[in-house]
Structures are given as structure tokens and as C-alpha cells.
Image (cartoon, grey):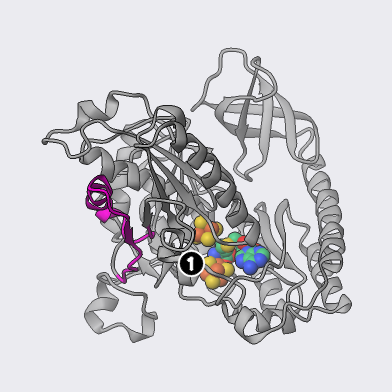
Amino acid sequence: MLETKTIIEEKQGEALDRKSKPIAGNGKKVYIESYGCQMNFSDSEIVASILETEGYSTTRLMQEADIVFLNTCSIREKAEQTVRKRIKSFRKEKVRKPHMIIGVLGCMAERMKSKLLEEEKLVDVVVGPDAYRDLPSLLEEVDGGRKAVNVILSKEETYGDLNPVRLGGNGVTAFVSITRGCDNMCTFCVVPFTRGRERSREPESILNEVRQLSKDGYREITLLGQNVDSYLWYGGGPRKDFDKLSKEEKERSVNFAQLMDLVAPIDRKIRIRFSTSHPKDMTDDVLKVMAKHENICKYIHLPFQSGNSRILEMMNRGYTREWYINRIEAIKTIIPDCSISADVITGFCSETEEEHKDTLSLMEYVKYHFAYMFKYSERPNTLAQRKYEDDIPEETKARRLSEIIDLQQKHSLERLQKDVGKTYEVLVEGVSKKSENELYGRTTHNSVVVFPKENYKAGDYVMVKINSCTSATLIGEAI
Ligand code: SAH
Ligand code: SF4
Ligand code: F3S
């Protein structure tokens, strides 16, 4: 999933209007900054929802906040360094405003646990991804002068009954979580440790959230999970394989293809996206449902991580290069006009020059529309850290990464150049950052399009003729 940073915001006062019971938070202002993947952004909306119910309000200004939360990511070392720097700047603010509470949420909270409180004495409260319902009472603890921590992981928690407060958004696109946690145990990855066991959310609560978003005028929904293809509702609790379900569980079960078949018809004006797909679990049924519903976007993010089967095995990804290529061929057959993006890691333990070339050749074969490309970063306590030596020198990792980036830029440009002269339906997301007279939006293929504003606005579907492109953006005009 794409990593970005944003600031969660909401108009002051709105939160207070909505609450109905006496308030623990008493209007105290909470500022939340989110890092990492879309799941974290989605979780911040759950956190806001829990706190609003308790009488807190949210603010977009750190300076006026009584409580500041960092919703953190641990995926690579650099992600954690960014968080540490940010905590330091919060601590400076705290010198000016001693009553301000600093809290760490999310994956780094889960990974570091009370270390951030005890050894490093950096923050006042530490809360892991499955313990957000406990936030109001943890904040009360802190008010009483104590430090508070809850990093208990759950096998059931999905926050399915909560109504996320849509924060900092454009009113057009929204995330809907469908699973939490991950059972895959890729050897390089911290997520199974920071997010716990995989569990699927009850379909009816997902459908209700989509219905509500439709009523509220949203135009695009992204179904979220670390591995959406392994979504399987059977009644709640940790993930089980379909074969292991009882007869009754099988009868009431809903898998990812079936879930999308239920979500798509709710509102044909709502585009459906999903992230992330896993090559080992992506079935033809999923592809067929995508082909069947026009409002499911023709775009798949299908991380491959490495183009070499020995490395894939060491990564415990559960597929080979050949299997991955088979999935690419299935996409091409069932959805001929589908765009594909990927994640790739370079310089994983013991990766040879030949094996690195296999990654390049797989990229050459698929010609991804775009890709997120990373140097391997060893994470404490992962299987790879325990079993393998992180033996690829930094310069080699950097050089291999730049080769991968160069190749991908070439492919991205080639892909977008093929769109020049074509006309696409674009869902407008907002005003372009570069010019007030231009709007930006996306095609079904997830390509960003910029075009003159005229009288169009965010949320409109506009037919745009593409006249030119850069390696990242299509440039066109409404027709
Ligand atoms: N669940 C998703 C990925 C989530 S993490 C999936 O399986 O595809 C997002 C991406 O970060 C991964 O796809 C991987 O490319 C990268 N990543 C994860 N751990 C990493 C590590 N230790 N070093 C470098 N990149 C990593
Ligand atoms: Fe990490 Fe693998 Fe799970 Fe993705 S599928 S979150 S890479 S363990
Ligand atoms: Fe996401 Fe980072 Fe956690 S990528 S699941 S926020 S470690």
C-alpha cells in the first residue's frame, strides 16, 4: 500500500453537535497525524469516531491541540525515524504547553510497546491498533498523572460497528476496511507482529458503510486489507481456510469475490477499488467479478516483491515467478484492459546479481503502470532477521534500486503515452496543486489526469480527451 503522510482534520464544533451524552473529553481538542499505509489512515478515522463519542473534538492545528496523536508505521526503519523526529518536535511544543498529552498509536506503538514510555520517556500514552476502544479510559489515566499503555492484540476486533469520521478527505473518495491483521508471515515483514491475526469484517457492516457513503455523496470506495483476496467471513474470529469451515460456516461464508459482487450494485455511481491483492490468493473469480461490474475499477495492485523464485521462497511469499506470471496472464485474459501496479523489494538477504536481473526481467515482462520500489530494510524480530543475514551492501542495494526505478520510469511513461489521443471518464477529486484553474482526478486505471476546470467540480465524472503526458500524469481537456 502506498505510504503517505497527512493531517487529519475536521471543522471545529461539528463533533460537539453530534454527541448526545455527558462528555469525558469535554471538548478537548485532538490532533491526529497519520503515517504508513491506507489502513492507518482508515484507523485514524476510527480513533476520531471513538473519541468524538466521548466528547472530544478534532483539530487540524497541532498548536491548539490538548492531545496529539501520531498514528505510526514500522514497515521500514526510515518510517520509524520519521516518527521519532516528529515526536521530538511535539516535545518542543510540550515545553511551551506542558498540559499537552502526546500519544503514539499504530504499528510502532505495537512494536515498541512500553519502551517508548519507560526507556525513552518520550510520550504519555501508547496504544496498539486493536486497543482503540480503550482510548477514552487510557486518556483518563493520563489525566490522573499516570502513563498509559494498551497494546493487546485481538483475534476478533474489526471495529465493524463503528461509523468512521471521514477526516481530512475530499468528500469524494473513502476507505472501507474489510480485514485487519495478516496471517501470511512474509519473512521480511513486521505487519503480522504489529497488526496481529487476520480477521474479516462482517459483510453486512461493510455494506451498511458503503450505503452510508453513497447517501453522503461519495463517489469512490477503496476496500482495504493487507490481503483482500483472503477475505472470508464465516461468523467472526481469526481467519480459517474454507476447507476447514463447518457445514454451517460454509453456507453462510462470503469470500472476496462474493463480497465485491454485493458491494458493486449498491450504487453504480460509486467506483470500487481495493488494495492489496496477493498473488497467491487472487482467484479467477475475483477477476470475473471485476469484469462483470463496470463500476469496479480496472486496476490491480499486485505486489511481486522479487522476480526470482528462490528469493520468493526465502521471503515466504507462497508463490513462484511462474505462478505470478500465470496470474498476470489471467488478468490479461479476463480483463484485457486492466492496469497493474506492484511493490518490489531489492537487496533482500543473499540476492545475487542474476536474481536481481530476474526482477528486472519480470518488470520488463509485465510493464507495470507504476510501482512502489524499496530497498530491503531489516526489521527487528521478523523471521528474516532471525534466520538470514542482511548481507547485501548498502551501495549494492542503492544501485539495484536505481536500476529498478529507471526501468519503471521508462515503463510508466510508455504506458501513459499509449493513452494520449484516447478519451477517459475521469472522477474529479479536487483542484490541481499546481494551478487553481485546473482540476485533477483519476481514470479507472488509477492514472492521474489534469485538465482545465471550466465549470466542473470535485465528485463529477467528466469525459476527458488526453492530449499529452509526463511520466506520472495525463494532461487533457473535457469534451
Ligand atoms: N500486504 C501488502 C504489503 C504491505 S507493506 C502485500 O503483501 O503486498 C507494503 C510494502 O512494503 C510491501 O509490499 C513491501 O514491498 C514493502 N516492505 C515490507 N516490509 C519491508 C521491509 N522490511 N523492507 C523493505 N520493504 C518492505
Ligand atoms: Fe506483510 Fe506479507 Fe502480510 Fe503483506 S502479506 S502484510 S508483506 S506479511
Ligand atoms: Fe501499514 Fe506501516 Fe503498519 S505499512 S500496517 S502502518 S507497519
Percent position of residue 120, x then y? 49, 59
**Magenta part of the chain:** 127-155
78 or 7: nearer the eye?
78
Res. 284 in view:
no
Let me know if residue 150 is in the magenta part. yes
Q: Residue 32 placed where, x, y %? A: 43, 40
Q: Height in image: 388 above or below 132? A: below
Q: Position of residue 211 (x, y in %)?
A: 31, 42
**Does 10 appear above or below 238?**
above
Task: Write down the quadrant of residue 258 in the picture.
Answer: bottom left
Quarter of the image containing the N terminus?
bottom right
Residue where numbered disc 1 is placed: 229
Q: Amino acid at mark 1?
A: Asp
Q: Residues within 10 Å of mark 1 (few under 14, many from 20)?
A: many
> Which residue is at 79% across, 70% downward?
359
Query: Quick one: quadrant of the C terminus?
Result: top right
Q: What residue sits 73% from the left and 34% below the top?
A: 474
- Asked whether residue 124 is drawn in magenta, I would say no
